Image (cartoon, grey):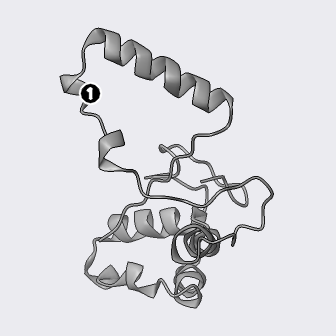
């Protein structure tokens, strides 16, 4: 995630990032509650102080509203909901298209790598990584 209000991101993509200030606990929690994601703070009071601060720092930098919008547009209501010209909806990957890299020959790896690079150049590849329980 990008830096906010003078935040210094020393982690990988905001994970474990240290801030030059302590985010307001109530405001940060409220941002998640308003977005329907208040459960992120379940068990918050059971954490050690350093763990609570780390979670607050990460959540402060996280644009939960944008992630909710992306989920709605791309997963929950994918039929043209993006409103962006030229943007297709997400489709499940067919099992036949999934390859186990450890079982590919060097020639297959080379061919697939070339195909992947060509698709990336054409802007036809997107990746969404979600984590959660």
Of the pair 33 and 89, the residue shown nearer to us = 89
Q: Position of residue 44 (x, y in %)?
A: 34, 80
The answer to whether residue 6 is above or below residue 97 is below
Task: Answer left or right for 16 relative to 120.
Answer: left
Q: Residues within 10 Å of mark 1 (few under 14, many from 20)?
A: few
Report if residue 46 is visible in the image.
Answer: yes
**Residue at 24% over, 21% down:** 104
Residue 45 lies in what quarter of the image? Answer: bottom left
Furthest-left residue in view? 103
Task: Answer left or right for 46 relative to 24.
Answer: left
Q: Quadrant of the C terminus?
A: bottom left
Furthest-top residue in view? 107
The answer to whether residue 5 is above or below residue 26 is above
Q: Position of residue 6 (x, y in %)?
A: 71, 55
**Residue at 45% over, 52% down:** 15
Q: Position of residue 19 (x, y in %)?
A: 57, 56
Residue 26 lies in what quarter of the image? Answer: bottom right
Task: Answer left or right for 93 relative to 14.
Answer: left
Residue pointed to by mark 1: 101
Task: Answer left or right for 24 relative to 49.
Answer: right
Q: Position of residue 108 (x, y in %)?
A: 33, 17
């Amino acid at each position: 995630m990008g830096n906010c209000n003078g935040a210094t991101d020393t982690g990988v993509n905001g994970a474990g990032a240290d801030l030059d200030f302590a985010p307001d606990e109530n405001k940060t929690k409220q941002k998640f509650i308003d977005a329907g994601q208040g459960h992120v703070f379940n068990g918050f009071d059971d954490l050690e102080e350093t763990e609570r601060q780390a979670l607050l720092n990460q959540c402060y930098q996280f644009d939960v509203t944008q992630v909710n919008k992306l989920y709605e547009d791309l997963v929950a209501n994918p039929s043209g909901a993006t409103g962006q010209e030229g943007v297709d909806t997400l489709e499940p990957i067919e099992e036949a298209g999934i390859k186990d890299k450890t079982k590919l020959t060097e020639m297959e790896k080379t061919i697939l790598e070339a195909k992947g690079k060509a698709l990336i150049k054409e802007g036809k590849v997107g990746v969404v990584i979600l984590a959660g329980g």
